[in-house]
Image (cartoon, grey):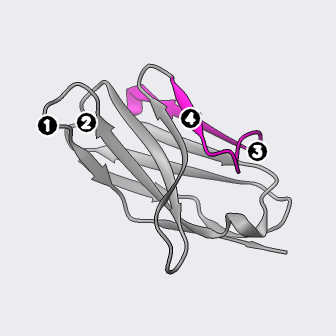
Amino acid sequence: VQLQASGGGLVQAGESLRLSCAASGGVVHPNGMGWYRQTPGQGRDLVATATTGGITNYASSVRGRFTVSRDNANNMLFLQMNDLKPEDTAAYFCRLWTIETLPQQNYWGRGTLVTVSS
């Protein structure tokens, strides 16, 4: 499975961005997909996730500002980011994991950079 993230960029605080992640190459359902972010020297932190069945989860720091959504038919994941803050600046990574396979399969895409200026 290959994951291609896009949509990052440079914005000012208070503005919005929409990230997209396209999964291809033998995607198995059900699965979970999510966004994680990482700053230099730090670990990769969960931002938001969504399963094939529509169960979502958000980091407390983004709840109410970010919305994760999926297009299961086209194996797409989106992240609508509103009211961006400088602390949202990070590389954002897309992840996909299988839910019913053993062992669980886990895939990561390359990051897309989001920079929020104050």
Q: Are marks 2 and 3 in contact (CB under 8 Å)?
A: no
Which residue is situated farthest in the bottom direction here?
Answer: 41
- Label 2 vs label 3: CA separation? 29 Å
Q: Residues within 10 Å of mark 3 (few under 14, many from 20)?
A: few
User: Residue flagged by tag 2: what amino acid is it?
Assistant: Val
User: Residue flagged by tag 3: what amino acid is it?
Assistant: Arg
Q: Earlier in the sequence, mark 4 or mark 3?
A: 4
When the figure is inspected, residue 36 is found, relative to residue 13, above or below; the finding is above
Which residue is situated farthest in the top direction here?
Answer: 53
Judging by the rendered image, the residue that carries numbered circle 2 is 27
Judging by the rendered image, the residue that carries numbered circle 1 is 103
Residue 118 coordinates in the image, percent (x, y) = 85, 75
Q: Nearer the viewer, mark 4 or mark 3?
A: 4
User: Residue flagged by tag 4: what amino acid is it?
Assistant: Asn
Residue 113 coordinates in the image, percent (x, y) = 56, 70
Q: Are marks 4 and 3 in contact (CB under 8 Å)?
A: no
For numbered disc 2, what is the local secondary structure? loop
- Label 3 vs label 1: CA separation? 34 Å
The residue at the point 56 percent across, 34 percent down is 57
Which numbered tag is attached to residue 65?
A: 3
Residue 17 coordinates in the image, percent (x, y) = 70, 55
- Label 4 vs label 1: CA separation? 23 Å
As drawn, is 107 to the left or to the right of 11? left
Which quarter of the figure has residue 9? bottom right
Q: Nearer the viewer, mark 2 or mark 4?
A: 4
